[in-house]
Amino acid sequence: MSLKIKCGGFLFGGLPTVAAVGAETTNASARAVSSVDMMSWSMGLVIVLAVFFLCVWGLRKAAGFGSVNNAGKMRVLGGVALGMREKVVLLQVGKKQLILGVTPGRIETLHVLEGDDCLVKEETAPSAVESGFAQVLQRLRQGRSDA
């Protein structure tokens, strides 16, 4: 065999190359697939799938996806669209509330509210939260334009 055929077989994991397959088929008949071959292929598939699901599980644990503890720590309380692509969002993070300006290319913190300054209290209903936030934001915008 030439050097190219040997290197090609080495690169493809010891698989016979096209020239080697052609030489073997003329001398021997095709080998039948046995139950041992099927069992080894099945075990290989099971191992690959197990490694895949183990990696997915590890990534979820490392990144904190699906964690019950993180479910209530951050949530969107409301938002107001300022234009076609711009909006202002009120975000609750722990005991702080953040007013964020959101555009397609950027998210910027406009103001941080803590303690008694919070716009939305825990007891209010979600529908009241959205309308209350919109009214407060409108008052703030009018106050800035008057000044």
Image: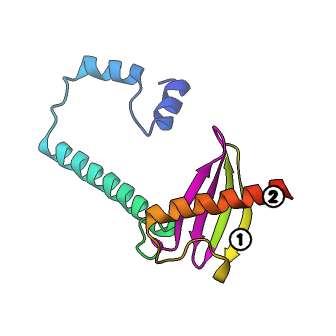
Furthest toward the bottom, the residue is: 115
Where is residue 78 shown, x and y percent of the image?
55, 59
Q: Residue at x 66, y 59 (%)?
A: 137
Q: Is residue 55 left or right of residue 45?
A: right
Label 1–label 2 contact, CB within 8 A: no
Q: Is residue 112 left or right of residue 22?
A: right
Q: Nearer the viewer, residue 21 or 40?
A: 40
Q: Is residue 12 visible?
A: yes
Query: Mark 2, residues whose alpha carbon is within 10 Å: few (<14), some, or many (≥20)?
Result: few
Can you say which quadrant of the picture contains the C terminus? bottom right
Where is residue 126 shown, x and y percent of the image?
45, 65
Real-space Cα separation, disc 1 to disc 2, in angstroms: 17 Å
Q: Quadrant of residue 24?
A: top left
Furthest toward the right, the residue is: 147
- Label disc, if present, on residue 144 of the rendered structure: 2
The residue beneath circle 1 is 112
Q: Residue at x 82, y 53 (%)?
A: 145
Q: Amino acid under label 2?
A: Arg
Query: Mark 1, residues whose alpha carbon is within 10 Å: few (<14), some, or many (≥20)?
Result: some
Q: Amino acid under label 1?
A: Val
